[in-house]
Image: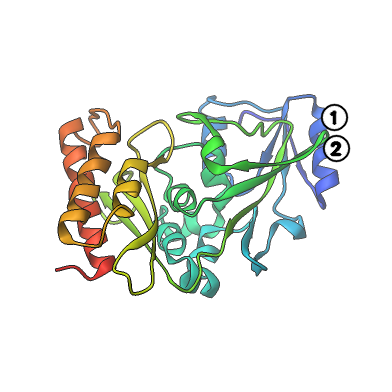
């Protein structure tokens, strides 16, 4: 394989020290379900792999005040089974439950799903709709990065895994009045790349028959998980009707930028699927029909 040394860090300072000594030739590894393949295929290289899965502070998934916090070593299986997420952010639990196979979900981490920077990642799309951000730590200090800013392009992360450790994902608790939903279109139910996936978060305005706030994230219809902001604005512009939901779905299909793909289908087909799946999801969430 395309690395020479493997070190298991016992704490965050130890991981940062190992990376600093490697002077850019080290790389953080957690689940490794993507990275090991990339190293084997020489898409990436590393003199040193720094395993962070033994760091206790990276293992938590909890509510903390107004936030839900997810450590970088939390796996998709743990997130999919989390009672907290199923109750308060079901869209994320649903997305995590769609990732790969049970064997993959047992070891792959949510943070890895983000750091690999694929626009259709089944955890990253719901996290985008939830307004998540990442805590990133290096020898120079720490910073919080909005998830939408964690992408430089397809497969290109804004987080430098040779010098930085992304330690935590957090997002605000949606609240009791929120509804969330994940949808996915693929050639088969498991072990297939999505033709389309999406996450919707809605907050209704009491009994006023309106949507107070809407967030819609879609993938892979751009170089990163895509927020359909025209559609979101449409949903909050008027009272809830079937026509309003259909117009929002039409706008989402228009503002997305899918490309024709041998794997995922033509641009026209993918736009049609955005419109179909989003309309269906909104109707189900708002009991229209």
In the foreground, 169 or 164: 169
Where is residue 190? Give x, y as percent. Answer: 32, 55
Where is residue 139? Give x, y as percent. Answer: 83, 35
The image quarter in which residue 157 lies? top right
Q: Is residue 57 above or below residue 158?
A: below
Where is residue 193? Give x, y as percent. Answer: 33, 44
Circle on res. 39: none
The residue that appears at 67% across and 30% down in the rendered structure is 3
The residue that appears at 60% across and 47% down in the rendered structure is 133
Is residue 248 something one can see in this rendering?
yes
Q: Which residue is mark 2?
A: 17
Asked whether the beta carbons under mark 1 and mark 2 sit within 8 Å of each other, the answer is yes
Placement of the N terminus among the 4 image quadrants: top right
The residue that appears at 36% across and 56% down in the rendered structure is 200
In the foreground, 193 or 206: 206
Q: Which residue is mark 1?
A: 21
Where is residue 248? Give x, y as percent. Answer: 24, 48
Under circle 2, the secondary element is helix
Placement of the C terminus among the 4 image quadrants: bottom left
């Amino acid at each position: 394989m395309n690395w020479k040394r493997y070190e298991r860090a016992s704490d965050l300072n130890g991981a940062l020290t190992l990376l600093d000594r490697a002077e850019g030739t080290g790389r953080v590894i957690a689940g490794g379900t993507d990275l090991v393949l990339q190293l084997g295929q020489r898409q990436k290289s590393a003199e040193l792999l720094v395993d962070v899965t033994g760091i206790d502070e990276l293992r938590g998934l909890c509510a903390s005040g107004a936030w839900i916090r997810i450590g970088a070593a939390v796996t998709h299986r743990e997130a999919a089974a989390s009672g907290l997420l199923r109750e308060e952010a079901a869209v994320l639990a649903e997305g995590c439950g769609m990732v790969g196979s049970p064997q993959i979900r047992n070891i792959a981490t949510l943070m890895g799903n983000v750091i690999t920077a694929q626009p259709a990642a089944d955890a990253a799309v719901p996290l985008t709709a939830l307004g998540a951000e990442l805590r990133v730590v290096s020898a120079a200090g720490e910073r919080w990065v909005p998830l939408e800013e964690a992408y430089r392009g397809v497969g290109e992360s804004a987080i430098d895994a040779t010098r930085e450790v992304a330690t935590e994902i957090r997002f605000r608790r949606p609240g009791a009045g929120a509804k969330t939903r994940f949808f996915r279109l693929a050639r088969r139910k498991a072990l297939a790349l999505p033709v389309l996936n999406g996450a919707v978060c809605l907050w209704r305005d009491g009994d006023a028959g309106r949507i107070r706030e809407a967030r819609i994230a879609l993938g892979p219809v751009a170089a990163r998980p895509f927020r359909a902001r025209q559609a979101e604005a449409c949903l909050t512009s008027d009272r809830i009707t079937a026509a309003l939901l259909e117009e929002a779905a039409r706008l989402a299909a228009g503002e997305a930028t899918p490309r024709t793909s041998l794997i995922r289908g033509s641009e026209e087909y993918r736009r049609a699927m955005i419109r179909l799946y989003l309309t269906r999801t909104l109707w189900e969430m708002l009991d229209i029909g």
